[in-house]
Amino acid sequence: MIWPDLITLRRIVLPPLERNERRLFGRDVMFSKPLQTRCFAGVVRDADVDDVRYELLAMDTVFPVNTATLKYHETPEGRAYECGSYALRPDGFFGEYQYHFRLWNHGEGVGVSAHYELNPWVRPRDHYAGVDWQPQPGIEKAWALLDIDSSADVDGIRPR
C-alpha cells in the first residue's frame, strides 16, 4: 500500500501553529519542538532528502509519520526544520515497536536522527510518556540501513 507523505503540509502548517499554540489553545500542544541532539546519527553525504526518502519508502515496513511533532534545531540562520519523518515497523504497521527516522537538509547532505520507541498507534499513552524510548538502537538501525557518515559534525551537533 502507498502511504501519503505529508511532510510539505506539515512544514507549512505546524510552525505557525507552534508560534501561536498558547494563544490558540491555552497551552503547549507540541506542534514543533527542538531535536534531541542525542538522537543524531550523522549525515548521508552527497544525497538530497528525496534520495533518502525514496530509499526508506522503498522498504515494505517503512511508513511516513504524518502525525509526529515537527522537530527542528537552531542554526545561525534560524530554525532548521526536519524534511521527513519515517517509521520502520518490522512487525508491520501495527507492530508494537518502531524505529523513527527524521531527515533534514544540510550542505554536506542529509542529516539523520533516529530513535527506537513504542508505536503510537498501538500504545499511544506509553508512546507519548516515553516508555521504552531509546536513541541508540534507532541510531544503530539508521547506520545499518543508510550510508551514514557518523563522524560528521552538522551545525554543532555531533553523533554519539
Image (cartoon, grey):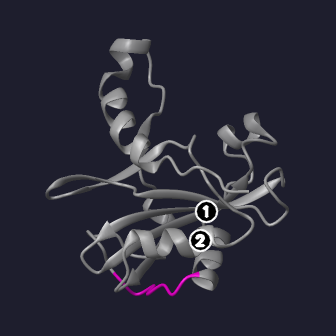
Residue 130: image quadrant is top right
Could you give the CA–CA distance between mark 1 and mark 2, rounded to whole angstroms? 15 Å
Mark closer to the chain start, 1 or 2: 2
> Is residue 151 found inside the magenta-colored segment of the image?
yes
Q: Which mark is residue 124?
A: none
> Is residue 95 found inside the magenta-colored segment of the image?
no
Q: Which mark is residue 56?
A: 2
Amino acid at the residue labelled 1: His
Give the answer, above or below, for where 35 lies relative to 12: below
User: Residue at point 44% right, 64% down?
Assistant: 103
Foreground pick, 2 / 47: 2
Give the answer, above or below, for where 135 lies relative to 6: below
| Crowd class of label 2 (few under 14; some 14 to 19; many from 20; radius 10 Å) | many
Give the answer, above or below, for where 26 lies relative to 159: above
- In the rendered structure, the answer to whether residue 72 lies left or right of residue 60 reads left
Where residue 37 appears, as percent x and y from the top left, is 43, 62
Q: Quadrant of the N terminus?
A: bottom right
Q: Which mark is residue 115?
A: 1
Q: Secondary structure at mark 1?
A: strand
Where residue 149 appears, as percent x and y from the top left, is 43, 87
Foreground pick, 130 / 72: 72
User: Residue at point 80% right, 67% down?
Assistant: 90
Magenta segment, which residues? 146-152
Where residue 133 appears, as percent x and y from the top left, is 68, 54
Q: Give the main secondary structure of the magenta stretch.
A: loop
User: Residue at point 55% right, 44% down?
Assistant: 68
